[in-house]
């Protein structure tokens, strides 16, 4: 929440703050499951597996899948810690990125529409994408938003409170 608190204007109040949904870790979870599955299935068939560099083939494949799981886990973790989404009584803020930063700040008075997009998985796990259309035709995506309908509702409530 450091970015959001550092960019608050005077007399601006934070209304809602969120980070990306845990779904950003799903590729890592899938690769970890594949790694475990390769070890289980490979160990039951280990008599038929050729030996390479002192390891059986299924162990090498499992290690490769484990490395992919670690890579995707780190990627998900960086996405999670380096992304912030917030609603204040004056603006909507989005910040994505750790080293290379992409930030967006839209004044509530400039918002024309809010589009929520959820896949079937998104509906089940309660995450989605939000596209905010501002004046001038810009449509900016907010990805992996947990409870996107709540985010839209909070935004609409703040727009209604505007003078």
Image (cartoon, rainbow, N blue to C red):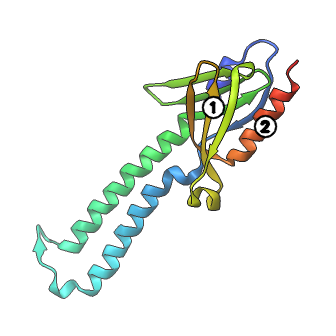
| Neighbourhood count class around disc 2 (C-alpha, 10 Å): few under 14, some 14–19, many 20 upward | some
Quadrant of the frame with the N terminus:
top right
SS at badge 1: strand
Q: CA distance from mark 1 to mark 2?
A: 13 Å
> Which label lies toward us, 1 or 2?
1
Quarter assignment of residue 158: top right
Residue 65, numbered label: none
Which corner quadrant holds the C terminus? Answer: top right
Q: Taking 99 as reference, is 89 left or right?
A: right
Horizontal relation, residue 55 to residue 136: left or right = left
The residue beneath circle 1 is: 132
Q: Is residue 68 left or right of residue 111?
A: left
Residue at (16, 80) in percent of width and height = 49
Secondary structure beneath disc 2?
A: helix
Q: Position of residue 46 (x, y in %)?
A: 21, 84
Determine the residue positioned at 69% across, 49% down: 147
Q: Which residue is depicted at the point 54% across and 42% down?
A: 80
Instruction: Tell which circle, 1 or 2, labels the residue nearer the N-terminal end.
Output: 1
Q: Quadrant of residue 108?
A: top right
Residue 100: quadrant of the picture: top left
Q: Position of residue 135 (x, y in %)?
A: 64, 20
Q: Residue furthest front?
A: 137
Q: Is residue 29 above or below residue 109?
A: below
Q: Which residue is mark 2?
A: 154
- Residue 124 in percent (x, y) is at 63, 62
């Amino acid at each position: 929440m450091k970015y959001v608190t550092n960019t608050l204007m005077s007399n601006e109040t934070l209304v809602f703050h969120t980070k990306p949904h845990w779904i950003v870790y799903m590729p890592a979870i899938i690769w970890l499951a594949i790694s475990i599955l390769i070890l289980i299935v490979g160990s039951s068939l280990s008599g038929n597996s050729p030996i390479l560099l002192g390891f059986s083939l299924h162990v090498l494949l499992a290690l490769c899948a484990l490395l992919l799981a670690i890579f995707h886990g780190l990627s998900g973790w960086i996405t999670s810690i380096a992304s912030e989404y917030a609603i204040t009584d004056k603006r909507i803020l989005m910040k994505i990125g750790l080293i290379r930063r992409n930030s967006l700040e839209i004044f509530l008075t400039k918002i024309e529409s809010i589009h929520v997009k959820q896949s079937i998985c998104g509906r089940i796990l309660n995450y989605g994408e939000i596209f905010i259309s501002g004046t001038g035709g810009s449509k900016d995506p907010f990805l992996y938003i947990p409870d996107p309908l709540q985010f839209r509702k909070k935004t609409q409530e703040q727009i209604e409170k505007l003078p």
